[in-house]
Image: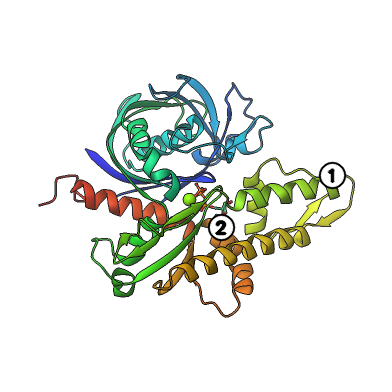
Amino acid sequence: MIKIAGIDVGNDSVKVVVDGSSRPILIPSIVSPGYERHILQEEDSPLKALDVQIRSPKLKRSNQRYFVGMLAMEDQDNSELEETDNKATSDQALVVALTALAYAALADQSYPAAGSLEEVEYIIGTGLPVRSFVAFHSAFEERLTGEHEVAFLSTPGLRGRTVRITIRRVVVSVEGAAALYHLATNDQLQVNNDEIHNGCIGICEIGALTTDFPVVKRMNIDNQFSTGEQFGLAAYLDSIIRDVEDQFGYRFPSRAKLIGRIRNREFAIQRVGEGKADIRPIVDMYFSRAAQKLVDLIRKRWKKYPDIECFYVLGGGASALRSYIIDAAGSMRLRFEEDSEMLNVHGYLKLAKSKSGYSQSGAPAN
Ligand SMILES: Nc1ncnc2c1ncn2[C@@H]1O[C@H](COP(=O)(O)OP(=O)(O)OP(=O)(O)O)[C@@H](O)[C@H]1O
Ligand SMILES: [Mg+2]
């Protein structure tokens, strides 16, 4: 059976939603070289220990072993994506994406494994930033399409299972615009928000490495006014990590570790010895700076295109910076949404369903 899925290959995290299953899967975009690890106590969930070997003709080095997501987060040799990486061509992005699709296939099955090799076929919806869409959407589509194999090694509950993923079709959309499509439609793809559907809407979608500013008019992307910036929250997180290390001698092993603390509002760090230190002032300084820069960009765009009726601020960066952006925006009204880092992936799934003409049962819709 063909599954339809939305996958957001984010620079910070890869998100997957499979049609018909309610729970989205999120895996941090971090990878480190895999090895035979000593397991004193098995992790309590497969997502905490994704240890995989991946075979794919699209990877420069096929058949390598990787630790992916949380398992790589503490590793000294881990790598997170950088500004110079392009998610349409990066091997690291593909490794996390394939791991996520393989995990989603196994997580979705309520019955036990049929054998050691399991097969899954996908039609997927995904997306690229405004500025790389034109140049890279075909390359991205080509990279994902085809056959790939993911074997789970020491992952608890999935040890020894191999998934052959065949991606039949890829529908690539534009980041931010897909999020708006999700906000304008219900699960049956019917319009349930006339204001968004008929209006001229500005979007500022703040990711980890890119921030997209699509303008959507009557649900069509405006070619002239849509644009994007090559920066996101990650640059500010890197600065915070550097300043915390300089001031307190404490090094966060990854951005993911830092953002985890910020999300839980745990601003006290343990210093070597008995003292604790408060990193809140450093976080406030950089996040206020980021917010000011984004508000300036939004104001500039709105002035350039006064037809815009309202501006949505979306993406994980909007969740992180919300209160700082509201402060910086003064009287300019901006709209925020809950779970805004998950909006694109829901939009990708809906766009894949709508453009591939497949209904939920996997049969072509009439
Ligand atoms: N609920 C949240 N609260 C605070 N910060 C968050 C939240 N969700 C995500 N973030 C942070 O916001 C940033 C952007 O997250 P997001 O998931 O939108 O990025 P991405 O889609 O992976 O990246 P990109 O769009 O550049 O590919 C990341 O640094 C992430 O850690
Ligand atoms: Mg994103």
Q: Which residue is mark 2?
A: 317
Dot 1 or dot 2: first in sequence order is 1
Q: Which residue is mark 1?
A: 249
Q: x, y percentage for residue 218?
A: 29, 67
- Disc 1 secondary structure class: loop
Q: Is residue 31 left or right of residue 116?
A: right
Q: Nearer the viewer, mark 1 or mark 2?
A: 2
Whether residue 310 is situated above or below residue 181 in the rendered picture:
below
Q: Outermost residue toward the left?
A: 366
Q: What's the residue type where badge 1 is placed? A: Gly
| Beta carbon at label 2 within 8 Å of ligand 1 | yes
Q: x, y percentage for residue 157?
A: 46, 34
Q: Residues within 10 Å of mark 2 (few under 14, many from 20)?
A: many
Q: Residue at x 83, y 56 (%)?
A: 277
Front residue of 44/301: it is 301
Quarter holding the N terminus is top left
Front residue of 84/118: it is 84
State whether residue 338 appears in this view: no
Q: Quadrant of residue 250?
A: top right
CB within 8 Å, label 1 to label 2: no
